[in-house]
Amino acid sequence: MHITLLGPPGSGKGMIADRLERAFHYTHISAGAMLREEVAKGTRLGKDIRKYLENGKLVPDELVTDMVKLEARGKKHFVLDGFPRSLGQAKAITDLHLNNVILLDIAEKAVIQRFSGRRVCSQAGHGYHLKFLPPRKAGRCDIDGSKLVRRKDDRPSVIRDRFRIYR
């Protein structure tokens, strides 16, 4: 099964992909997570990617498409998290033979509220929300004890720009 979850920022794509991964052992492929991982490594490529991500901009199609296709290669079951994001990306992945495309929708105002409380594990990216899914110990990941941080792209101004780009 090859699935892609599409929708605006904050629509729940990552959460649903995580659940499919746990329940059915699908490989969860998140282009965003792969890009953030490259940034965290501090490579030259990561430094270039950082400029796009911190401003809520899309990373060039060819780069993201190549990363996703490499990750999907040879996987019997996978779920793409928020990919493709452009017509160019969609055309470039026809060889991945997607079986299902699921579109999620949410209002921009709800996303701003949701992201204002979102925190992620600084080591592995485990997700939390201060109101809806708080960690057992304030400021610390339940899984590995790492510090929880707010992503730079969770600022309201960046979210509004991401919605504009998404539309």
Image (cartoon, helix red, strand yellow):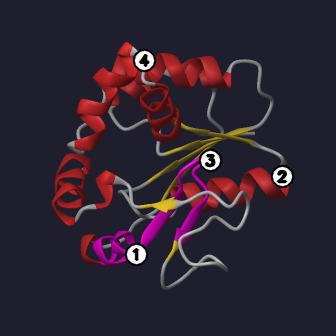
Question: Which residue is disc 3 drawn over?
Answer: 124
Find the distance from the CA under tag 3 to the CA under tag 1.
Answer: 18 Å
Residue type pointed to by label 4:
Thr
- 5 on left or right of 144: left
- Number of residues whose C-alpha sits closer than 10 Å to that of mark 1, classed few (under 14), some (14–19) or many (20 or more): some
Question: Which residue is disc 1 drawn over?
Answer: 117
- CB contact under 8 Å: marks 3 and 1: no
Query: Which one is closest to the eye, mark 2 or mark 4?
Result: 4
Magenta stretch: residue 40 in it? no
Question: Which residue is disc 2 drawn over?
Answer: 24
Would residue 58 be visible to someone looking at this image?
no
Where residue 81 sits, quadrant-wise, is top right
Q: Give the mark nearer the N terminus: 4 vs 1.
A: 4
Query: Which one is closest to the eye, mark 4 or mark 1?
Result: 4
Question: Which residue is disc 4 drawn over?
Answer: 43
- Residue 73 appears at what percent x and percent y? 69, 18
- 92 on left or right of 56: right
- Residue 125 appears at what percent x and percent y? 57, 51
- 21 on left or right of 15: right
Find the distance from the CA under tag 2 to the CA under tag 1.
Answer: 29 Å
Dot 2 falls on a residue whose secondary structure is helix
- Residue 123 appears at what percent x and percent y? 59, 47
Dot 3 falls on a residue whose secondary structure is loop
Find the distance from the CA under tag 3 to the CA under tag 4.
Answer: 18 Å
Find the distance from the CA under tag 2 to the CA under tag 3.
Answer: 21 Å
Residue type pointed to by label 2:
Phe
- Residue 29 appears at what percent x and percent y? 61, 37
Residue type pointed to by label 1:
Gly
Query: Which one is closest to the eye, mark 2 or mark 1?
Result: 1
Magenta stretch: residue 113 in it? yes
